[in-house]
Image (cartoon, helix red, strand yellow):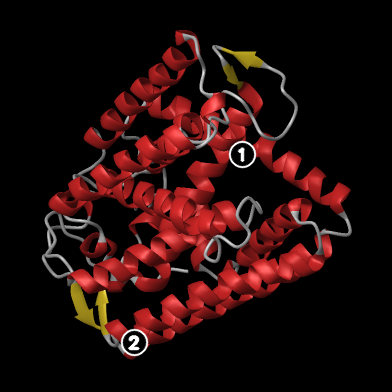
Amino acid sequence: MSLPIDSARYTSEPYTAPRPVKVLFWLLLGVTSVILAEVVSFSAPLAFFDVWGVLVVFPLYTLHALVLSWIVFRPNRPTINALFLAGVIFGMYEAYITKVVWQPTWGEMTWIAGGIYLVQSAILVLFWHPIMAFVLPLMVVEGLFTTSHETLDSLPQRLRRMLCGRAAPLVVAIFALYCGLYQGMNSPSAGASLLSGIASGLVFGALALLWQWVTRRQAYTLRALLPSRRQAIFLGILLLFNYLWQGILIRPEALPRTPGPHLTVLGMYLALGVLLYLNIKHAPALSQTYGIETTTSLTLSNETCSARRISWKLALLFWIVFSLTSAFATSVKPAACLVVLLSWVFGIGIGLLILVRSAVAPGHVGDGHG
């Protein structure tokens, strides 16, 4: 889903893209994050068409994605460790906003330690949000709408080659199949699945077409489209405001009345913040690999335009397979549940592995960079 390597442009202090272009890109990032995390899970199947989705879900996901992206990308090139840790911090909103880590709304209420429920917390914080709400949305919007591929470059080399080579359609189809099974497991009917898939697809497609019209043959890197320092501070204030009002109004009865559970969560925030800081600090500088370049936009060549059209074919493939699989999975829910359960075990295992590696070897790049 990425553009050719020779089309990438990297910079340590990039000139910014025009504000309207930035805002449109921010909307695309937020919409993608909501779709992969909330629509796929059927937690908010019509997230862009109901009050809860528009006023709570969409601002929450968009602000998290933007602020954390700015933190990870600002000083050095991103590593999978740093991206994952930022995604874990993203998922920690399940404490003071939804209170799910303290009082789950799904699953069995077992395995509690330090005042938090381990199973639900591990699924949401170590797997679902880091991958589905942060890393993958960044990779998708960077691959479809920019000329850079830094997020993709953070992955292990074998996985990166799969996503860039002839196996890309198969990888996308398998991922769409998984997303469809996941949504179908929670969807009440095939009609509800199709409605959710079509509705979210129309929103994403409309914004994507608007992006194509606004940018025309002008392209930008991801860094040029992320918030500036001043914009990030403003967005961070908005995010804190969301924590304040949503923390007060959403399930206030689930907020712990004793200090123990709060200390556990605050300790997790502190540990994750320190790990993120260390992994960003020790990440290789941009100039060490890519060199310093101030170009943030360029005129697309015919080859690059062709590569972008191929990316849109993959996006269309995802939507078709996802929607049809979700509709079908509503009639085979036991099989879908088994697949999802296995993905939880595998995802949490990978999450723990990355977490340990980020603590043992901060800034580790892996084999994803040449």
**Which secondary structure, mark 2?**
helix
Residue that protrudes farthest toward the bottom in the picture = 302
Characterize the local packing of mark 1: few (<14), some (14-19) or many (20 or more) Cα atoms within 10 angstroms.
Answer: some
Disc 2 marks a residue whose amino acid type is Trp
Q: Position of residue 296 (x, y in %)?
A: 18, 69
Q: Position of residue 258 (x, y in %)?
A: 49, 9
Quarter where residue 248 is shown: top left
**Disc 1: which residue:** 347
Residue at x-position 53% and y-position 34%: 126
Q: Decide if residue 236 is on the left or right side of residue 228.
A: right
Residue at x-position 85% and y-position 51%: 333
Can you tell which of label 2 and label 1 is closer to the viewer?
2
Disc 1 marks a residue whose amino acid type is Gly
Residue at x-position 28% and y-position 87%: 217
Q: Position of residue 99 (x, y in %)?
A: 53, 30
From this view, report whether residue 194 is shown above or below residue 35.
below
**Disc 2: which residue:** 213
Residue 169 visible? no
Question: 241 or 39: which is nearer to us?
Answer: 241
Quarter where residue 361 is shown: top left
